[in-house]
Amino acid sequence: FSQCEQTLQQEIDAGRGTGEICNLLAWCYQKQNQTTNARRALEEGIRIEPSHETNYTDLTRILLANQLLPSALESAKKTTVKFPESSKAFELKGAVEAGMGQFRDAVESYSHAAQLDPSNVDSFLGLSDAQSAAGLTKEATASYEHGIRQFPKDARFPAHYASTLLRESELGNANARVRAKQLLETSLKLDVSLFESHYELGNLELNQGRITEALQ
């Protein structure tokens, strides 16, 4: 990454800097844990090419990844104002709001992202999770079920839905426990690498006294 950084910086010093070059430079900095420099590079990219959406969204991503949540939210809001028809921009805004515990705002942002692009799987998943976290159980259930039908190959929907049901099962809902187990098994058929699903399934087996199955 340091070699890439030098190559890109030479282009900028030679007056050949573009929004794309600034974006690449920013990710070189990010990979070297130089968040401040990454932020500056993206801000420069935005100045050079203010109509280039990727620099706006990547700035939000980097701020979010480094838990600079107030700055990430400010960046996300600016992006949605600049690109009001961008599903990705509203999805990122929802992700930041969810990270800050502003789940009702996240529901609104994810809902708008899903309306702008019905094929944006991450916005539907984010919406389902945000509704669940906001205590909108009925709405979250409908969203998870919709996601499972619309994106049948995405293992995250049954896995996340199962997590929601497991919380309900702790309150004594036996039906939720049975459904959660089915969903966990479905998620692992789609993606055997989901360690969370293996773990939760193991807990269910353990709670039922099925030690051998739980160990596996």
Image (cartoon, rainbow, N blue to C red):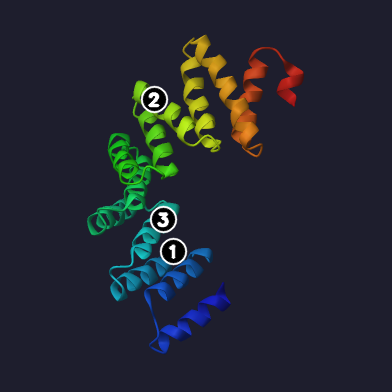
The residue that appears at 67% across and 18% down in the rendered structure is 206
User: For residue 26, which quarter of the picture?
Assistant: bottom left
Q: If you read the primary sequence from the N terminus, does the residue marked by circle 3 or circle 1 appear first?
A: 1
Q: Tell me the residue that label 3 is attached to.
A: 61
Q: From mark 3 to mark 2, how far is it between C-alphas?
A: 28 Å
Which of label 3 and label 2 is nearer to you? 2
Question: Between residues 12 and 124, which one lies in front from this camera angle?
Answer: 124
User: Counting other residues with Cα less than 10 Å from the Cα at mark 2, is it few (<14), some (14-19), or many (20 or more)?
Assistant: few
Q: Amino acid at mark 1?
A: Thr
Q: Quadrant of the N terminus?
A: bottom right
Up/down of 110 relative to 182, above or below: below
Position of 53 with respect to 37 (left or right) is left
Q: Nearer the viewer, mark 1 or mark 2?
A: 2
As helix, strand or loop, the secondary structure at mark 1 comes to helix
Q: Amino acid at mark 2?
A: Ala
Residue 169: x and y in percent read: 50, 15
Q: Which mark is residue 35?
A: 1
> Between marks 3 and 1, how big is the CA–CA gap?
11 Å
Q: Residue at x 31, y 70 (%)?
A: 46
**Which numbered disc, 3 or 2, marks the residue that appears first in the sequence?**
3
**From the viewer's perspective, is 72 left or right of 34?**
left
Image point (56%, 75%), residue name:
2
Residue 68 is situated, as x and y percent measured from the top left of the image, at 37, 53
